[in-house]
Image (cartoon, grey):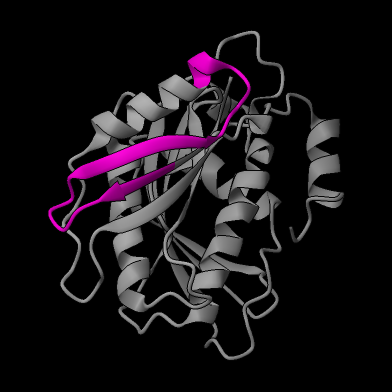
Amino acid sequence: MRSLVFAFLIVFATPTTLFADEAAYQQQVHRHLFGNSSAFPQPLQDRSLDIDLTVTLDRNGKLLSVDVDRSSGSSEDNDNVVTGLRRIQPFPPVPGDVQVPYKIKLPLTFAPTRNVAFINLKGSKAASPSEKEIAFRGEILKRLYSYDHRPVLPDNIEKPADARPTVVFSIDRDGKLLDAAVTKSFGLKMVDDNALNWLKKAGPFPSIPPELKAPMKLTAEIVFGPPTFSDDARIKKLINGVCRGC
């Protein structure tokens, strides 16, 4: 059984200044994709694939177009991914001060449900982090997602989406890991240790830009893949029910 995960932070299709509202909207789209990933066509549940897309949305979050920037290698799989995106629309409405039509690049990966599906990475306590900090977090996430030995849950865990251990770590100016600790336990020592060891081995991380303070403290909430919906009735309930617009 497989589910959709994300390669790294969603980025814009064209260069632009990243305002707080836009950064928040990126996270809304990210959560919407993650929360509705099980609505993608069943053939994708048995695949391991990567695909890069550019998605265009209108003000209300309606999908206007999907362009395949990098193919998965299979036209059938490409079509199934596009079908999944159409199933889960509308996406969250685009903020009023952001220009539409709105283009977002989506690098997507399909992977086992019991691997890490989403990492919620937090930096400074500032309400509106700077463009530089947001971009740097994206580089950290890219490194974490690209490291092969991501945490995996034991087979006897019935609700993998409930597994959310949280790790706090610090890096120096050169990206060297200074310390790391589990601050919110999953409840099983082996899962906590797995998450902590993965973080330690994923370094060294990108160097902190001169514009940002060092050392930097970061918090990573590690979320595992949700159960996969395996029948049309459940998919229809997901699309038309409580997850719409979440």
Residue 234: percent from left, percent from top: 83, 33
Q: Does the magenta stretch include residue 188?
A: yes
Give me the residue at 18% from left, 50% from top. 175
Residue 226: percent from left, percent from top: 65, 31
Q: Is residue 146 magenta?
A: no
Give me the residue at 30% from left, 58% from top. 216
In the rendered image of this protein, does residue 19 appear above or below residue 9?
below
Residue nearer the viewer, 72 or 200: 200
Q: Can residue 219 be seen in this view?
A: yes
Apparent side of residue 119 relative to residue 86 in the rendered image (left or right): left
Residue nearer the viewer, 78 or 183: 183
In the rendered image of this protein, does residue 22 appear above or below residue 181?
below
Q: Is residue 151 visible?
A: no
Residue 176: percent from left, percent from top: 17, 45
Residue nearer the viewer, 167 or 26: 167
Give me the residue at 49% from left, 24% from top. 192
Apparent side of residue 6 relative to residue 32 in the rendered image (left or right): left
Residue 92: percent from left, percent from top: 68, 67
Residue 207 appears in which quarter of the rendering? bottom left
Q: Which residue lies furthest to the bottom in this view?
A: 97
Apparent side of residue 212 relative to residue 153 in the rendered image (left or right): left
Q: Give the range drawn in magenta.
A: 168-191
Q: Which residue lies furthest to the left in this view?
A: 174
Q: How many marks?
A: 0
Check the picture and name the quadrant holding the C terminus.
bottom right
